[in-house]
């Protein structure tokens, strides 16, 4: 009998593409849309999982921009604690597309620089980057000076990057009503005080997130010197929500959030030839792995999971000056130290009061 599915390759069928293939299906799940050239300068950003991607790209000698490097006097083991070397600038985790959009608007002076402080005892923290200065600032004016410098670094990142790797993390967020700013974490989790009259919970929809990212693309095209968009690789974080403020079961909230983000990534890839989707979410949640890619808490991605994601990536995007994954350049001591450090993740702090 003749029908449209006759003659399709094995990967088009669940039995031969997934159930019978195991790890082999992971290797064939991704085909790159474009090439990362050896000289391409890469900027990374996104949710906590994006830190894994940054570290792995560094360890394989890709040309990652770091335009807000650590001061020479800061010991190497403290770099990430102070927000250095996590990404291409000290913006910390960017969980939502709206966060990314507002950062770009401030970097290109399309909205006033927001100076929003939280108090933690005697410490003053930047509410938009609450983890980058664990000791806090001495005063708000010092914090504002740091933020002004940071935005200049972000602008240079967006102007210079040839490749932008962004991990979509959350649909849920908290909005400061006075400024309209999206916060990386709810007030009170790290510092500050939660006041429902001043902060509102939001859960962005497919259309909202799609529009937010399209507006971000428009800013890049307007202000980049060549008026050209960079190559963009989108991923969806495979990490489930630590907690939800939506009132639903966290499993339902997680599934809804990831489905929306995955659909947005697919639509952006369909609309724009310069955008590719890399399936880290699908690899980590692959049915044949039976949670091997998660730690015991079923949330933290295991070392095996990270390696599997990057092996798939590197099979398509070979590291500069390296012909195979087996011939990787040895990591420097400083890079090795970075790789063993735990992720900086504000979201996990929401669980710390569970056992009190």
Image (cartoon, rainbow, N blue to C red):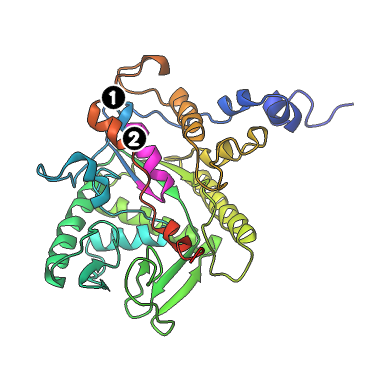
177 sits to left or right of 336? right
Task: Check if mark 1's residue and mark 2's residue have beta carbons within 8 Å.
Answer: yes
Name the residue tied to disc 2.
339
User: Magenta stretch?
Assistant: 45-57
In the displayed structure, would residue 132 be above or below residue 297? below
Callout count: 2
Tell which circle, 1 or 2, labels the residue nearer the N-terminal end: 1
Residue 27 in magenta stretch: no
The numbered dot on residue 331 is: 1
* Inter-mark Cα distance, 1 to 2: 10 Å
On the image, the x and y values in percent for residue 43 come to: 30, 42
* Residue that appears at 51% across and 29% down: 308
* Residue that appears at 60% across and 71% down: 247
Q: Secondary structure at mark 1?
A: loop
Q: Quadrant of residue 109?
A: bottom left
Q: Secondary structure at mark 2?
A: helix
């Amino acid at each position: 009998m003749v029908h449209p599915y006759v003659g399709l390759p094995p990967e088009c069928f669940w039995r031969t593409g997934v159930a019978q293939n195991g790890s082999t299906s992971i290797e064939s799940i991704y085909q790159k849309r474009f090439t990362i050239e050896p000289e391409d300068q890469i900027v990374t950003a996104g949710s906590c999982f994006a830190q894994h991607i940054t570290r792995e790209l560094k360890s394989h000698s890709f040309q990652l921009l770091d335009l807000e490097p650590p001061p020479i006097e800061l010991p190497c083991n403290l770099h990430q604690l102070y927000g250095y070397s996590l990404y291409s600038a000290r913006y910390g985790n960017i969980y939502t597309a709206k966060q990314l959009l507002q950062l770009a608007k401030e970097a290109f002076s399309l909205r006033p620089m927001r100076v929003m402080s939280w108090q933690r005892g005697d410490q003053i923290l930047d509410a938009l980057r609450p983890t980058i200065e664990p000791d806090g600032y001495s005063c708000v004016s010092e914090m504002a000076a740091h933020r002004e410098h940071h935005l200049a670094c972000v602008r240079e990142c967006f102007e210079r990057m040839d490749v932008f790797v962004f991990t979509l993390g959350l649909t849920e967020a908290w909005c400061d009503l006075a400024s309209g700013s999206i916060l990386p974490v709810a007030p009170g989790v790290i510092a500050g005080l939660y006041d429902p009259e001043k902060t509102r919970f939001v859960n962005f929809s497919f259309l909202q997130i799609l529009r937010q990212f399209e507006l971000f693309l428009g800013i890049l095209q307007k202000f980049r010197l060549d008026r050209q968009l960079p190559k963009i690789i989108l991923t969806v974080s495979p990490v489930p929500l630590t907690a939800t403020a939506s009132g639903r079961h966290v499993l339902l909230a997680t599934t809804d959030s990831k489905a929306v983000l995955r659909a947005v990534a697919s639509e952006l890839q369909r609309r724009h030839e310069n955008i590719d989707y890399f399936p880290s979410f699908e690899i980590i949640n692959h049915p044949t792995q039976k949670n091997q890619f998660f730690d015991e808490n079923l949330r933290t991605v295991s070392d095996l999971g990270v390696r599997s994601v990057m092996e798939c990536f590197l099979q398509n995007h070979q590291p500069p000056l390296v012909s195979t994954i087996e011939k990787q350049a040895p990591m420097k001591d400083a890079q090795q130290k970075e790789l063993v450090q735990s992720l900086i993740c504000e979201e996990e702090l929401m669980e710390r009061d569970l056992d009190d």
